[in-house]
Image (cartoon, helix red, strand yellow):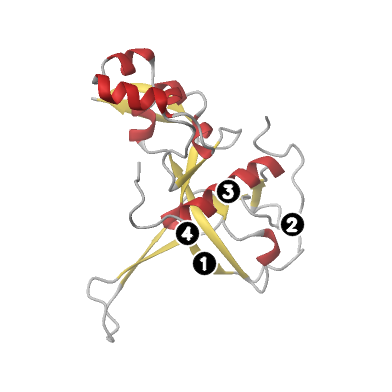
Amino acid sequence: MPFYLDSPTKEFRFGDVLTGFQHPIVRIDKPDKRVDLTISVARPQYFAVMTPCCAIEQNSISLAPLVEVRDAIVLKHPRLRDNLSLINVPFPPREGFTEEQIGKMEPDKQAIIMSESAKYTYFDCFVYEQNGFFPSYEVKRNKLTVATIQYRMVDFKSIFRVECSLIEREREAPTELKMSELTVTTRGHLRDKLTYYFSQNADDVRE
């Protein structure tokens, strides 16, 4: 199933891959009425649009940096290395582990893993598949390279709002900003997982 559209539309859409923006990070150690904060600026090469298509207007848009997938995800689930985007949808946890990994688990844990039905894993992130412009990077264990991949991910905790005069409803996105667009199916997966993330209760079990 395609992840990206072969021929992207010209407008900004939810889930689009953009470039050219910056990521301001605000730190406030002791919140009070005084202005006591530190602002740093990061420049990731790519961002994902986190504003729903119908709400992209009035020079405002929400973005999230597209960053390298956490080493822990890649190392813990070797069966997913060739299909890391599987974590974008509910799937049986056993599919993320090799038979060898399951065989080394305690019997009680084995029984749980084998009996669990499909569910979201790493519910706070969404993986973008490899493409022609994401640079490759190495994932290492004990200084040894175990995988070379191009996948990127959105951490929902990193979503931020930016104002830009180029952002307007149904306005064509500058070609130098919009790099790629998700298919309708992939955009639906992103919407579903983002909804699930924001619907979690404090007592819910987290992976």
Give the image location of residue 135, x and y in percent.
Answer: 50, 35
Seen at 26% across and 19% down, the residue is: 107
Residue 161: which numbered mark, if any? 1
| Labels 4 and 1 touching (C-beta < 8 A) | no
Q: Marks 3/1: CA distance?
A: 21 Å
| Labels 4 and 2 touching (C-beta < 8 A) | no
| Labels 3 and 4 touching (C-beta < 8 A) | no
Q: Nearer the viewer, residue 41 or 109?
A: 109
Which comes sooner in the sequence, label 3 or label 1?
1
Which is closer to the viewer, label 4 or label 2? Answer: 4
| Residue matched to label 2 | 11
Q: Amino acid at mark 3?
A: Asp
Which is closer to the viewer, label 2 or label 3? Answer: 3
Which comes sooner in the sequence, label 4 or label 2?
2
**Where 126 sits versus 149, above or below?**
below
Q: Nearer the viewer, residue 109 or 3?
A: 109
